Image (cartoon, rainbow, N blue to C red):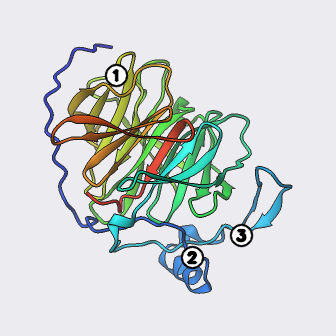
């Protein structure tokens, strides 16, 4: 893969219909919210499950239906959710750099977690290194198995991120992970639980994590030996619209990132770096209490 490429960047994020949306903190499990969730989105119904607690014996716990939020009036209250190499689930609030422990997810996987992306309704789709995909509640870390068949298209692992659609919905985009280079861009239909390939990255990229915005933009964070590329991606074909080389990244790291409040929040091992796309500056912002392998943020997050 060539590492010489243009680094001029035009980082302009356009406001769209989702501009004022908010993410979910801890969904209330009232009868009213459960009924509203069933009426708002049939795909979220009937999701009771047996939850395996990391420290206790298995017990029956209800995985609550959560209503889909469409107007998101309080974008500033949105949280970034972080997944640790030891299956820790935390929330992170960028304005105050505050971490909050939610719990340890206990999904029945033979290997550790790989990546995560969060819906507007507060559900974290979480992939593991064995290729399995689970739903995790950002309210209490409860885990629910899905019928996703691992290794579709030969993609066992992938970076993940939601981006808003022009019709007001959102799509879960994935970037296939290869030996060194990405296998390309695709998306997962979370109703049918099928993976569809969109196309190779143009030009070819190192392995990438993804994040999106309520304006519909999709970005990739693609580390290599001495840093990383931060890329703006055309969702329709995998074309790299523009790119910028940054110092955060490197080899032998766990990594993830999220877009919040006009900035990119880069997570490499336990280091949190804030990247300002306007001034193109990187600032070490915080140190997490664990190594981070996944990050997810609602497309309701402020632009």
Across and down, in percent, residue 43 comes to 55, 67
Residue drawn at x 49%, y 18% as measured from the top left: 179
Above or below residue 289? Residue 246 is: above
- Taking 52 as reference, is 38 left or right? left
Rendered residue at 34%/71% (across/down): 74
The residue at which mark 1 appears reads as: 227
Placement of the C terminus among the 4 image quadrants = bottom left
Position of residue 180 relative to residue 51, above or below, is: above
Residue located beneath label 2 in the image: 28
Q: Quadrant of the N terminus?
A: top left
Crowd band around label 2 with a 10 angstrom C-alpha radius: few (<14), some (14–19), many (20+) = some
Residue reaching furthest to the bottom: 32
Nearest to N terminus: mark 2 or mark 3: 2
Residue 66: horizontal and vertical position, in percent? 55, 72
Q: Name the spot of residue 49 as percent of width and height, x first.
A: 73, 63
Q: Residue at x 34, y 36 (%)?
A: 220
Q: Can the viewer see residue 191 in this picture?
A: no
- Asked if residue 207 lies left or right of residue 116, the reply is left
Could you tell me how many numbered marks the image carries? 3
> Compared with residue 217, is residue 210 higher up or lower down, i.e. above or below?
above
Where residue 133 appears, x then y in whole percent?
Answer: 60, 46
> Cα distance, mark 1 to mark 3?
43 Å
Kindly state the secondary structure of the residue where label 2 is placed: loop
**Depth-wise, is mark 2 or mark 3 nearer the camera?**
2
Q: CA distance from mark 2 to mark 3?
A: 13 Å
Q: Residues within 10 Å of mark 1 (few under 14, many from 20)?
A: some
Say which mark, if any, is on residue 62.
3
In which image quadrant can residue 154 be found? Answer: top right
């Amino acid at each position: 893969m060539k590492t010489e490429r243009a680094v001029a960047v035009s980082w302009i994020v356009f406001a769209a219909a989702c501009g004022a949306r908010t993410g979910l903190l801890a969904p209330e499990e009232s009868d009213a919210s459960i009924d509203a969730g069933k009426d708002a989105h049939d795909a979220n119904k009937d999701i009771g499950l047996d939850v395996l607690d990391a420290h206790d014996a298995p017990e029956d716990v209800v995985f609550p239906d959560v209503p889909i939020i469409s107007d998101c009036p309080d974008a500033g209250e949105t949280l970034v959710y972080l997944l640790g190499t030891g299956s820790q689930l935390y929330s992170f609030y960028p304005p105050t750099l505050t971490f909050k422990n939610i719990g340890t997810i206990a999904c029945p996987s033979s290997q550790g977690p790989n990546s995560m992306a969060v819906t507007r309704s507060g559900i974290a789709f979480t992939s593991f290194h064995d290729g399995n995909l689970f739903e995790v509640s950002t309210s209490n870390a409860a885990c629910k198995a899905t019928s996703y068949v691992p290794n579709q298209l030969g993609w066992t692992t992938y970076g993940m991120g939601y981006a808003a659609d022009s019709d007001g919905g959102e799509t879960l985009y994935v970037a296939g992970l290869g030996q060194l280079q990405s296998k390309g861009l695709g998306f997962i239909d979370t109703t049918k639980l099928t993976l569809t390939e969109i196309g190779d990255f143009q030009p070819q990229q190192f392995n990438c994590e993804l994040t999106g915005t309520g304006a519909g933009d999709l970005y990739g964070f693609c580390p290599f030996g001495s840093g990383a590329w931060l890329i703006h991606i055309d969702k329709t074909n995998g074309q790299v619209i523009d790119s910028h080389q940054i110092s955060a990244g490197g080899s032998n790291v766990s990594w993830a990132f999220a877009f919040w409040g006009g900035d990119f929040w880069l997570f490499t091992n336990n280091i949190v770096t804030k990247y300002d796309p306007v001034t193109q500056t990187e600032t070490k912002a915080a140190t997490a209490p664990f190594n981070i392998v996944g990050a997810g943020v609602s497309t309701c997050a402020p632009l």
